[in-house]
Amino acid sequence: MSKKKEPIDIDWIEVAKIGMPIVGPFVQGAMWYGFANIDKRAQALSRFIAIAEVIPAVDLNLPKGVVLASMYDGVEDALAIWSTLVETLQEIPDKVKELVEETKEDIEELIPTKEDILPDAIDKQKFLADYGDCLNGYNRDTPSYLKNDYSKQLYIQGCLIRKGYGIKFIKQAIRDFLL
């Protein structure tokens, strides 16, 4: 006789309470970044937020995700304002100014471009060849009594997903949206 194992009882509300403070700022940031890329006024506000958050005396009390996305989008402007701020303050010793300049240069070296981060584009010639291969496979493998538009779509879509085009199309959509 085999004993049935008791199902694991997971309190998903507690999991959400633990996970949301971690995931929440990234979701907010992604939504703000997308909105800032759609609307020019939101992009200007995003740049203002990035510049204002650099100044130590200014705290806009915005959600962390909005500040994160604004800093990602406007890091070059924020670094320029930071340099101007350091140059205008006379009370700062030269060593601190040099340290800030070195830090700024280090940050500028680490900033990737959008093209570095985004996935590679889909090769259209390869996709058309793979689509043709899937279509030939459908015609070769499917019996005539099962051939119809629905089975053809299902077979070709399944074939393309097996070839990795499901995630590639999602990445291409993200790439097209951000560029």
Image (spheres, rainbow, N blue to C red):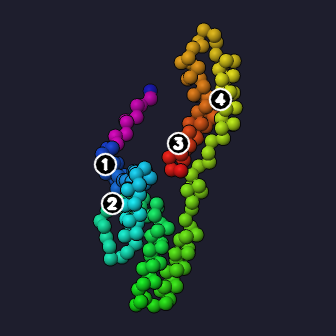
The tag earlier along the polypeptide, 1 or 3, is 1
Q: Main secondary structure of the magenta part?
A: loop
The answer to whether residue 93 is above or below residue 7 is below
Q: Which residue is mark 2?
A: 63
The answer to whether residue 125 is above or below residue 52 is above
Tell us which disc is closer to us: 1 or 2. 2
Q: Is residue 168 magenta?
A: no
The answer to whether residue 21 is above or below residue 124 is below
Q: Which residue is mark 3?
A: 173
- Magenta residues (range): 2-10
Residue 98: x and y in percent read: 52, 85
The tag earlier along the polypeptide, 1 or 4, is 1
Q: Which residue is mark 1?
A: 14
Identify the residue at the far front of this view.
Answer: 40
Residue 121: x and y in percent read: 61, 45
Residue 28: x and y in percent read: 37, 53
Camera sees residue 23: no
Are the residues at dot 1 and dot 2 in contact (C-beta closer than 8 Å)? Answer: no
Horizontally, residue 53 falls left or right of residue 116, namely left
Q: Is residue 4 magenta?
A: yes
Q: Which residue is mark 4?
A: 131
Are the residues at dot 1 and dot 4 in contact (C-beta closer than 8 Å)? Answer: no
